Image (tube, rainbow, N blue to C red):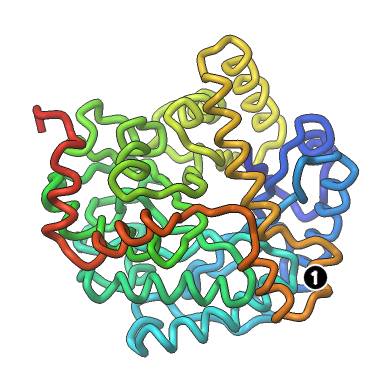
Amino acid sequence: MLVASLSGTVVTDGLRHLILDDKVGTVLLFRSNFGDSAGLRRWTAQLTALGRQAGLPAPLMVTTDEEGGTVDQVADGLPLLPAASTLGTAGPAAVRARVAAMASGLRADGVGLDLAPVADLRTNPADAVIGSRSFGSDAGVVGPLVAAYVEGLHDSGVGATLKHFPGLGGAAGDPHQEVVSDPVTPGQWSATTARSFAAGIAAGADAVMTTSLRVPNLDPSDQPALISPAIVRLLRDTLHFGGVIVTDSLSMTAVGESMPRATVDAATAGNDLLLMSSGSTGLEDQADQMLLAAVHSGAIPATQVQASAQRVVALHRRYAVTPTAAKLALPSLQSQLRAATMPPMTARRRRSAQRLARSPSTARSTTSNVWPSST
């Protein structure tokens, strides 16, 4: 359930401990770790070998944050994308083609899951973190572009992550630096951002990232979304998402508590994959120990942990790059993906998500009984 990360340019003893002893099976890498495409390939080869040595239940998976524009980790070796605000002007077909070309390079470098695309609608000019990373402010325009981005990643065998749920583009400020809040009402959310996320879910998104935004009208407890059971239920029960729910960085200022404590709270809330992002493998080991203690004490039900682990393992089996998979020709890879056993979107759920993406009124009627009556 944990995602490790670290500062530095080499595999450290601390990271080896997380993989070999704590059995952490997902590693997040940034440009500061690997430098260039060749460096990324060296990292992924070493990490994959460590995963095999650890005897993990599924191949270790490497993920990165490759959106395009200002969020661009791999500086060479693959076709770079412009920011979403520019990329989207060419229309969904062009987005899909350009993303597929980029994702082909990602997979060749050993990356199985991309933390993209951004599904946020940018509706607040005082936003300090989304900006040009969003395809726009109109769900009717943004939804098909988000879906095309997901499809482009899948065309080249890379998993897709929608972010930042329940929508970060309507809040002022940057949650990396401060507490941010969005006063959006359930009706407003259903008619806007819910539709862009629903479009990505209908396209088969593999993961959705919760963030540290506070949305008091969607969750009266006013907890950050990534540790809020109400927000996780919104994603599961209203948008009918059956895939992996991954947190944004649990080390952000806006979370409001220590990373190890936030890791336990995020798991308790129902997130499946926990992005620690501390840069300190020692602190991440501490988070792992706290999480284990919470499970052993019964604070987090074992059945919930098992369900999360099953979703994560299925994601890894579908997308993690192994030496054998890396040598497959793309048509064979696509055949494998189509036959994969993880079904994050049943036919019924896909139809429901498609209706939500198309129709604000449908979204409102579907969500009318989700929020407490006090809102």
Which residue is depicted at the point 70% across and 81% down?
A: 331
Residue 355: quarter of image: bottom left
Residue 358: quarter of image: bottom left
The relative height of residue 126 versus residue 185 in the rendered view (above or below) is below
**Left or right, 29 with reference to 241:** right
Circle 1 sits on which residue? Answer: 326
Image coordinates of residue 108 in percent, x first then y, are 74, 74
Callout 1, which amino acid? Ala
Image coordinates of residue 139 in percent, x first then y, are 23, 68
Residue 275: quarter of image: top right
**Left or right, 177 with reference to 47:** left
Which residue is depicted at the point 29% across and 72% down?
A: 142
**Total count of labels:** 1
Number of other residues with Cα within 10 Å of mark 1, as a class: few under 14, some 14 to 19, many 20 or more = some
The relative height of residue 295 versus residue 3 in the rendered view (above or below) is above
Image coordinates of residue 1 in percent, x first then y, are 62, 37
Task: For the C terminus, give its image quadrant.
Answer: top left
Image coordinates of residue 315 in percent, x first then y, are 62, 52
**Please, which residue is most extreme toward the top here?**
297
Which residue is depicted at the point 58% across and 62% down?
A: 159
Look at the numbered disc 1 and give the secondary structure of its residue: helix
Question: Looking at the image, which is closer to me, 300 or 368?
Answer: 368
Question: Looking at the image, which is closer to me, 370 or 339?
Answer: 339
Which residue is depicted at the point 67% across and 21% down?
A: 289
Question: Looking at the image, which is closer to me, 247 or 75?
Answer: 247
